[in-house]
Amino acid sequence: MNLLWLGDPKSFDVALVGGKAANLSRLARLYHRVPDGFSLPVTVMAEVHPLDLRDEITAAISDLMNCHRLPDFIAAVRSSAVDEDGATASFAGQHETYLNIVGADAIIQAVMRCWESARSEHALDYRRKQGLSIERPQIAVLVQQLVAADVSAVVFSANPITGNRDEIMINASWGLGESIVGGTVRPDTFIVRKSDLAITQRAIAVKQRMTVSAPGGTREVEVPRFLRTQASLNDEQVIEMAKLALTLEVTMEHPVDVECAYAGDELYLLQCRPITTLK
Amino acid sequence: MSNSEMQTPTPGQPIPMPPNFQVKWADPRDSKLTWMSSPQFKTSISPLIYAVISAFLVGGNAGFEGAGLPFEIRIERINTYPYMGMVPKAAPPDVVIKGMGLLNRAAPGVFKMMMGKVGAGMSKQQEAALNPIIERFDAYWNDELLPEIKQHIAYFESSDLRGMSLDQLRAHLSETLKRVERMAALHGVIMPMLYAMSQFEELYCELFEGATTLDALRLTQGFDNKTMEGDRALWRLSRAARSIPDVSEILSKRAAGEIIPALEKSAASQQFLADLHKWLAYYGQRLNSVFALDQPSWIEDPTPVIQNLQAYISMPNLRPEMEPAALAAEREKAVAEARAKLAGYPQPIVARFETLLKAAQVATVVHEDHNFWIDQRLFYHVQRVIMEFGGRLAQAGTLDAANDVLYLTPNELQKGQDISMKRLVQDRKTEMEHFSKVTPPPMLGTAPAFEMTDGGSMVRAMFKGEMSPAPTGNSEMNKVKGLPGSAGVTRGTARVIHSLAEAGKLQPGDVLVAIATEPPWTPLFATASAIVTDSGGVLSHSAVVAREYRIPAVVGTGNATATFKDGQLLEVDGNAGIVRVVSENEESDAINLQSAIENRKSNEPALVG
C-alpha cells in the first residue's frame, strides 16, 4: 500500500506526507469538510517512479468516484515539501500545483510533473539556501478533489497587517483561490472581532479577475461586470469562515492562515498553516 | 441649404427656426424642451392619426416607468409634423443643467466621470425595476400580459360597428382611444424584452473572449413566433398555388390587382381562394405600416400578399419551413458549448447566464408576437372604427369622403353637427399640403445642454433596438458601414423600398434596402437575399427577422437608402456590417446575380416533382 488516505492517522505524520497533507488529515479527522483525496508519501516519492503507481492510483480514483458518486474525478494535484508548513519556514508555491486535472491518466501525469519538479535545479537551489537536505528530495504529493469554488478566501486568524490578534481578517473573491493567492485580484476584505464575532469592517472591492476551471487546468478571466462590485460573501458566510479560523487557531495552537472556499452552501477547508510573519 | 442640414445648434440655447417653419408654442415652457422629429414619421400626419399616435405614446410612458426610466415621452404635432420630446420626471433646476453644459465644455474629463456616475446610478434603478420581471419573463408575458392583450382584441372583434348608432360609435371611439392607451402600456413589454436581449448579449460577450453580439444571439434563435408562423402559412399557400395549374397560371401571368377577380371566376381555384381568405382573415389584420390608418388593411386590399405569393411561386426551391429546425439545431449546439465552458464558473455567473438566456429566448419571441397582437391587430381594429365613423359621416353628408374623418380631432368628432366639418377638413388639407413642401427640421425648441454619455443599461438596450443612433461618418458614394444585424455575406441587386406599395419591385434574390423594415413587411424577407437599413440596431425588427430567415443584414447605416440605387449589384457583409456596390449595372453582372440567388437557396434540396 503506497497511498495514504486523507484522514488516515498515518497521514498525521508530517515527515511522511508533508505539512499540508498532515494538517489536512488531522483537520479532516477533527471536523472539517476537507475535499477528499490521498497522499503519495515522501518514502514512496523518493523510491518509486510515479508510472509504477499507475494501477494503485487508478484504483484509488475509482474508489473516490464510487464513494462520492462522482461522474468524473476532478483533482487538484499538489506537491508538498516535508519542511513546508513547519513553524520556521514558509515556502508555499515553491513546488507544483495542478488544478482541474480530470481522470486517472491526467492525474498520473500531474504526479509525474511534481516528481520531476522536486528534482529541478530551482528547487534544489532553494533548499540549499535554506540549509535543507538536498540528498533526496523530501516531497510528498497530495491528490485531492478540486472543489468547484464559487468564492475562495484566505482567512487570517490574526490581522496580518496590524498584527492585531483580536481580530480575524478575511480576503475573499470569486472563483478558485489562485487569483487571491497570486495577488492578481483585489479581494473583498472583512474584519471580524474575535470577542463577539462582530463584523467590524467590510471593504467590497471591484474584483476584476477570477480563476476558473478550464479544460486541462485553470484560466484567469475577467469577472463579468454585474458581479464585480457584489460582495463575494454574505454576513453569515463571513461568520462561518471566522469561526472556522478560530477553531483552527485553537487546534494548531498558533495564529493560522486558512484557505477555504464555498461551493454552493458548503464551506470547504483547503489549506491551513501557521502565520510565520506575524509581528 | 435644406432644413435638415442646419448647422449644429449651441447646447442649451434656443434652436433657430427656419423661416418656413416658425413655431408658435401653445405652452411657452415647451420651447425649453428638445423636440426631435422621428425617423418613422417623416411625413405630415393628420389630426386623427396624431390623436391615435399620441394616445399610444402617452400609454407607452407606463413602460418607461416600469423600466425605471426617469422621463416621459411627449408628442406634439408641430406644423403638421409629429415631434417627440423627452420630459425628465424630476428635472434638475435650469441652473444645474446650465452648469453641467458649461462643465462639459470646460472640463470634458470631469464631466465624463460625473456622467459615468449618473449613468451607474440610473443603471441601478433600471436594473432594480427590470431584473424581477426578466427573471419570470415567460410567465410575465404569457400569463400576465398576453391574456389581457387578447381580451382587448376580442373586444374589438366582437364590436358590431355596422350595428352601432352614430352616438354609440362616438362612445366607441372614446373607448377605442382608451384601449389604445392601455394597449400601449402593455406594449411596454418591449422594455424588459430589449433589456433581456441586451443584457444577455453583453454578458455573453464578456464571458467568452472574442464572441460577437451575433454569436450571442444565435443562442436565442429558432423559436417559432407569430411572424414566422404567418409567413410560413403564406409560403404553404404558394406551394398549393404551384400545384394547381389554373391558380399558378393566374398568379404568374396577371397583375396583382387582377388576381382576386380572376381567381373568383376560375372554378379550379375556389379551394385556393378560400384558403387565401382564411389566411387573410387571421394574418391579414394589419396595415401597411403601424400607423397607416389612412390606408386599407390587407383584408381590404390584399395586394401586398398577392405580390408575395407571386414572388414565392417563382421560387421553386425556397422552403422557409426548414429554417426553424436548422436554427434550433445551431442554437442548441451553441447553448451546449456555452454551458460546457461555464461548468467551472462561480454559481452566480452560471445562474445569471441561465436567467438571461431564458429571458432572451422568450424576448426574441415576444419581439415578434407583441407586434402581431398590438402593432398590427390593434391598429387594424382602430382603422376599422375610424373608417366606419368616416363612412357614416360621409353618408350623412357631413363629410365629402370617408377618409376625410382623418382630418378631424376626436373632440370635434364627439361634438357632432354643430361645427362645419367640411370646412375644418379643407383648412387642414390646405395646411398639410403647404407643409408637405417643407422639410421639417430634425430638432426644435432648445438644444440639449449636454448629451447623456451613459443613460444606463436600459437606455443602452433601447439604442440597440429601433432607435439606434445612426452613424454620421458614412460619406462614400458606393459603400456604407452599419452594424452587423445578421451573419453571412451575399450579393444581390439593390431595391430601395420606402413603403410596402413599392414592394412589388423586389425580385427573388434582391437586397431589400429600406429606412427600416416594418412588421408587416416580413414576408418579403423570404424572397430577399439580404436586408440593409438606415436605422435600427442589432435588436431591431429588421435584424431579428433577418436572423430567423438566415439572411445577412446590415442595419443602422444612416444613409443606405440615400447611397444605393435600384439595380446596383451590392455585396452585403452581415458579419462586418458593410455594404458596398460591386457593379452599377445588374445586367452586366447577371451571372453574379444568378449565383447570389443560388446562394440563397444553396442549402436546400431541389423540389422533387
Image (cartoon, coloured by chain):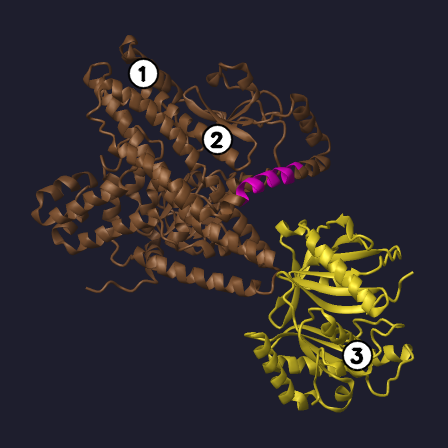
Q: Position of residue A234 (x, y in %)?
A: 68, 52
Q: Do dots 1 and 3 share one subunit?
A: no
Label disc, if present, on residue A18 of the rendered structure: 3
Residue that badge 2 annotates: B61
Q: Which of marks 1 and 2 is nearer the N terminus?
A: 2
Q: Do the residues labelled 1 and 2 touch (CB within 8 Å)?
A: no
Please say if A228 is above or below B502: below
Q: Residues within 10 Å of mark 3 (few under 14, many from 20)?
A: many
State which region is magenta. B118-131
Label disc, if present, on residue A126 of the rendered structure: none
In the foreground, B80 or B592: B80
Dot 1: what SS? helix
Asked if one can make out residue B535 in the rendered structure from this viewpoint, the answer is no
In the foreground, B246 or A149: A149
Chain B hue?
brown
Mark 1 residue type: Gln
Q: How crowded is mark 1: few (under 14 residues within 10 Å), some or many (20 or more)?
A: some
Q: Residue at x 83, y 87 (%)?
A: A136
Q: Do the residues labelled 1 and 3 touch (CB within 8 Å)?
A: no
Please say if B410 is above or below B252: above
Q: Position of residue B70 (x, y in %)?
A: 57, 32
Dominant SS type (magenta):
helix
Dot 3: what SS? loop
Q: Distance between the residues labelled 1 and 2?
A: 26 Å
| B37 relative position to A266: left or right | left
Q: Position of residue B87 (x, y in %)?
A: 54, 26
Asked if one can make out residue A227 in the rendered structure from this viewpoint, the answer is yes
Mark 3 residue type: Gly
